[in-house]
Image (cartoon, rainbow, N blue to C red):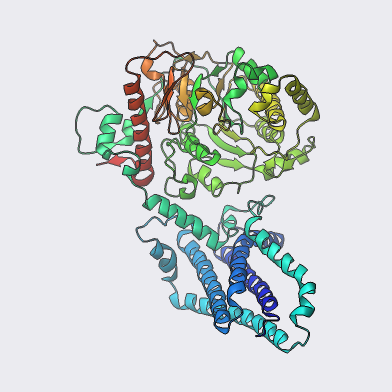
Amino acid sequence: MKNAFWFRASLWKCVVFALTIYGVFFALRLGFVAYIEVFDHDITHIPFSTYFQILSYGLLYDSNIVGILTLIMFILGLFLYQSSMGRKILHILALLCIIISLYVGLSQIWFYHLYHDSFNANLFRDDIQFSIFIAPWEEYTHWKLFIFLISCLVFLGIMRIGFKIIDFVYQTNPYTHLSYQVPKYSPLLILVVCFVIWEAFALRNVATKHLQLHSNLQKTLPNAIHSLSKTYKLYKQINHSSFSDYIDQSPTEVVKDFFELQEDLPHYDLQKLLQKSTNNACNTQINHIFYIIVDELNDWCFEKGIDEIGVCSELNALVSQGAFKANIFLENASSDIASLETQISGLFDIGIDLRLASKQIENLKTSLAMNFKALGYTTNFFFGGNRDHWDKLDEFVHSQGFDKSFYDTQITQNAKTRSYKPPYEHTMGAYNQHLVNFVRDRLFVGYQQKSFNVIVTTPYTKDQEIESNYTQYIQEFVQTHPKIAKQGDIHLLSYLYQQDKILAKFIADISERFPNALFVITSTHNTAKLSTPKNKYNVPFILYAPSLKLIMLSNVGSHVDIMPTILELVAPNKHEYVSFGRPLLSNKNSPYQENLYKAFGDKVVANERFIYDGAHIEYVSQGLERTKDKELASSLYQHLQQARALSWWIFKNGYKIE
């Protein structure tokens, strides 16, 4: 092929390659949906409009994979296309991409037939290759191979025909001389390159923003290759992890040390060892519990000096009215999703994506929802963002005992139906005022059962609108108090100021209708790494229950202590539950116990006087140094490592240790 037009031929072949790959994924998804329609009796007839939605939104899921593959082919083409051997190599690579895509896609369909799930569960055998690539093909092997071979021939033929047409055009057209055509085709070159880059990296988390599907149909949306990569990542995390990654002790040594056992036993039951019982002297019935996790809410908002701006004036007012606020409260994970996983599961952060292993850890005894279901509460999970903001979040919350889950689509629809004031949504999901209104509206409309409700606010983003009077107030304050601006920009401060007002109104509305309600307010993790040791690790924890008399047991804790604290206040006396945490509050007077004033966070521990990160002790709250603080800090940190190791054991092996 003449050098005059090799790069244009290569460019057009990349376009043909991309369209063929799109066709492969489109056909696989269509086949997957049709298979579910015919063989899945849990689903009624699918309307044509739903087919159209699935297939069109599915293209957005596919665009990342298509863009990356096309970009790779284009870059390789710049180096290989000028030679005959190079072109053969490129053609072989294109053929392999088609064959592998078809094999993986068909494997996922057969995998669904076996396990009623996509590539995200039942893969935890010793041989993942067998689980994914061989087991799905064992039944009806001849028919499956026939479908695979026919599919390969069809799509390889289509791509081959496209390549032949391009070769024919450029080898016979006299007007393909480089000097004549390059200026005309340069914009096209730039356009196509930009398009594939955009496909590869820009279309993330947009696919199902307004799409509601049956959970089984939802499994058809993610691209099979994408699902496989996620599954393999989790497989590596799990199978390359071991107990020794967390601590240099044997499991039995850890159990004896952590639970302070004196005698050796042939086996240990972690479920029994972690069992606690309530000591509740109050007969007040709490009918509705609201566990609110507010994005970007930091403890520095409540600090002296910062509180002058009134960013959390309404929450501070709750504290002055009798709400409890912990003095030191540590995050249990350093990211939003990891923190949600630890709070929902009741396990410490082990560095593994729990939500991707939902089938392996169904109904953990330590989980939030399971413990409140045992008390007769219906369990609801509300998230203002999109259900696909974090992969498999919906499956994870249901695996941990939540009866129902709600996301931005239902929230914005409710706001529009009731003609609430716009705007309704931004790039990350629904506005938080509509989120809490949705929760309130569901509760007010004939809701008779006791309910436990986890409410996770929509992730903060700078593109969301804030009421102008709030922004104006913050701007004027920052101008007269320039040091405040260092704690966060005007938009963030305005956002927090508005959320404070939204939460206060929600709590007031619910409390008026249901006086026997309980509210917990916290955040996922600390996002303001300020200079003071306390602010570096602290997150807020506020508990408000106007019908209860709150008696403090400890004002030092972490996320893992929230569930035991609520259970201590609402569960019957002597109610047993399983948890790594311990209550910070009670309805019953008890003597001061210094050993209760301790917290295990994310690679950091604390008591009422100091915080220790494994290397340095930093004193907080005017704490005074004592002679044995180093030994105490090391012992607390050892217990944190042991708790993480035991959490890994429960995740991987269950509750029995022999």
Residue 616, compared with residue 61, is above or below; it is above
Figure quadrant of residue 641? top left
Quarter of the image where the N terminus is located: bottom right
Figure quadrant of residue 583? top left
Which of the pair 336/382 is nearer the observer?
Answer: 336
Residue at (52% x, 13% y) in the render: 549
Residue 228, compared with residue 358, is above or below; it is below
Horizontally, is 506 left or right of 134 in the view? right
Residue 522, compared with residue 24, is above or below; it is above
Residue at (44% x, 75% y) in the render: 141
Whether residue 301 is visible: yes
Quarter of the image where the C terminus is located: top left
Q: How many callouts does the rendering have?
A: 0
Q: Residue furthest bottom?
A: 172
Whether residue 311 is visible: no
Q: Residue furthest front?
A: 179
Which of the pair 50/265 is nearer the observer?
Answer: 265
Q: Position of residue 7 (x, y in %)?
A: 67, 76
Q: Position of residue 228 (x, y in %)?
A: 50, 60
Residue at (61% x, 16% y) in the render: 304
Figure quadrant of residue 625? top left
Q: Position of residue 71 (x, y in %)?
A: 62, 66
Q: Position of residue 173 (x, y in %)?
A: 75, 87
Horizontally, is 254 left or right of 598 in the view? left
Which of the pair 370/630 is nearer the observer?
Answer: 630
Horizontally, is 641 left or right of 416 in the view? left
